[in-house]
Image (cartoon, rainbow, N blue to C red):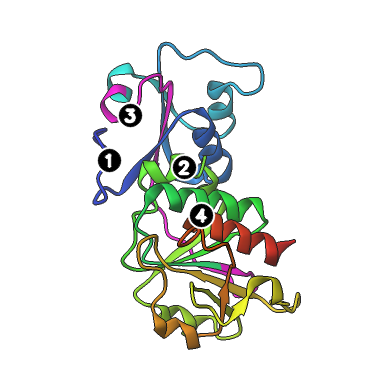
Amino acid sequence: MEIKSYKKSFEHSYTFGMFPTVELITSRPQAVVKVLVSSSYRSDNSIDIFELCRKHNIRTEINDKAINKVADKENCFVVGVFEKYSCSLSSSQSHIVLVNPSNMGNMGTIIRTLVGFGLSDLAIISPGVDIFDPKVIRASMGALFRVNFRYYDNFEQYRAEFKEHMIYTFMLDGAKSLKDVKHDEYKKFSLVFGNEATGLDSSFAGAGTSVLIKHTDRIDSLNLTIAAGIAMYHFCS
C-alpha cells in the first residue's frame, strides 16, 4: 500500500493526530493497517501509542517522511492507516439522516454530536461528502469509528428499509414547532436534515412530521450542526 495524499478512490484512509487514531484503534482495530509515528513523538501519562498498538497487535512504523507526505497540518505526530469498511444500520436503533451533505466539517461535527447523545446510526442520502475523508474524521474527533453508516441512492430507498421508524423532517417551513413535538419513547425515530445550502425540498413535507426549530427573525436560519444538535437533544433527553 502506497502512502500518499488521500483521494476518495483509495481503498484506505488516514487518521491525523493522537485522539482520532486512538479512537480508530479501540473501536475498529480490525481495520487498522499500521500506525505511523513521528520521531518527535513523546508519550503522555495517559496513553502510549506503542503500548496501545502492541495490545491490539497493530504494526507501528517511525516514518517522518510518510507523515509529512499525507498530513495536511504541521505537528502531526501520529497517523493511523486503515482500510475502508462498510456498515449496515440497525432497525432497532434510531437514526440521523443527512440528505446530500456537502460540508466535511459539518458532517464530522454531526457525527460527534450524535455519538454524544447516545445515537449510533447515520444514513447518508447521495450525493454526499466522503465520510472517510480525513477532514471528516478530524472534525468528528474519531467518533466516526463508533457509528454505523450507510449511503443510500435516495430517501425512498432508505424509507423502504425502515418502514417502522417515525420520520421527522426538519424544514424552515415545518408544520410543527419542535417544542410541541412529543415523541413516543418506545418507537424508533429518524431525524432528517437537508444540506447546508438548500435544506430539504417541499417533497419532504409529506414524508413524516415536518418540524420547525423556531428562532428570531434576526437570522435567516440556523447552522446545520446547531439545528441537528438541538433536535438530538430534544429527542434524546
Disc 3 versus disc 2: nearer the observer: 2
Residue that mark 4 sits on? 225
The one nearer the camera, 122 or 183, is 183
Q: CA distance from mark 2 to mark 1?
A: 16 Å
**Which residue is rendered at x = 49% and y = 34% of the image?**
21
Q: Could you tell me if the residues under marks 4 and 3 are in contact, i.e. CB atoms within 8 Å?
A: no
Note whether 139 is above or below 51 in the view shown.
below
Residue that mark 2 sits on? 139
Quarter location, residue 185: bottom right
Q: CA distance from mark 3 to mark 2?
A: 15 Å
Disc 2 versus disc 1: nearer the observer: 2
Residue 173 drawn at (x, y percent): 49, 77
Disc 2 versus disc 4: nearer the observer: 4
Residue that mark 3 sits on? 71
Circle 2 Cα neighbour tier, 10 Å, few/some/many (<14 / 14–19 / ≥20):
many
Read off the magenta span. 68-95
Q: Earlier in the sequence, mark 3 or mark 2?
A: 3
